[in-house]
Image (cartoon, helix red, strand yellow):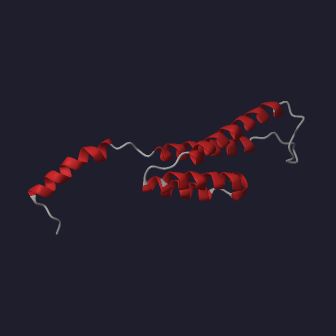
Amino acid sequence: MPNLSRRHLVTTAAALPALIAREPDPIFALIDKARAAYDAHGRACKGEPVTADGNLDLDSPAYPAWQEANEATCDASWEALNDLLATPPTTRAGMAAVVRYVTDIPDAEIGKANYRAFLDSLNAHFAA
């Protein structure tokens, strides 16, 4: 049975404002941003103009606009991922979430250098 003495309750209550006032781990917002940017790029890639037989239609009048939108969403996706990889989590839950997110990204899409930057960022933050 838990200790419900007056002293325990007062001590616990005194700690509540510090727990409530604690800033949320910024990594969660960055994970959401990276996921949304990645999904937007995926949707842009699927919207490419194609011929009747399913090949990419480079001669389509829609191709230049598609290419521009695709490149913009690609750039936004990489920027969001780089922001995520450069920001160390501030909580254990944040650490678990970012490791889970990063390890779910296909190797071909993140690259060894980005994995290394991510691990170096975590090491620098948590070794200090």
| Quadrant placement of the N terminus | bottom left
Q: Residue at x 50, y 43 (%)?
A: 29
Residue 111 in sight here: no
In the current view of this chain or complex, which residue is farthest to the right?
59
**Residue 34 x/y as whole percent:** 59, 44
Q: Taking 122 as reference, is 117 left or right?
A: right
Q: Residue at x 56, y 42 (%)?
A: 33
Q: Residue furthest left?
A: 6
Q: Give me the residue at 43% from left, 52% from top.
A: 91
Depth check: 38 or 116 in front? 116
Question: How far across and down, in percent of the image, does residue 45 sit?
Answer: 74, 43
Residue at 82% in and 34% down: 63
Percent across and percent down for residue 104 are: 61, 58
Position above or below: 17 against 66: below
Residue 122: name its quadrant.
Answer: bottom right
- Judged from this view, the residue extending furthest toward the front is 128
* Image quadrant assignment for residue 3: bottom left
Would you place residue 62 above or below residue 50 in this image? Answer: above
Residue 60 higher or lower than 20, as above or below: above
- In x, y percent, where is residue 110? 68, 52
- The one of 44 and 20 positioned closer to us in this rendering: 20
Left or right of 35, for residue 97: left
Does residue 99 appear left or right of residue 3 in this picture?
Answer: right
Quadrant hosting residue 65: top right
Q: Nearer the viewer, residue 51 or 89?
A: 89
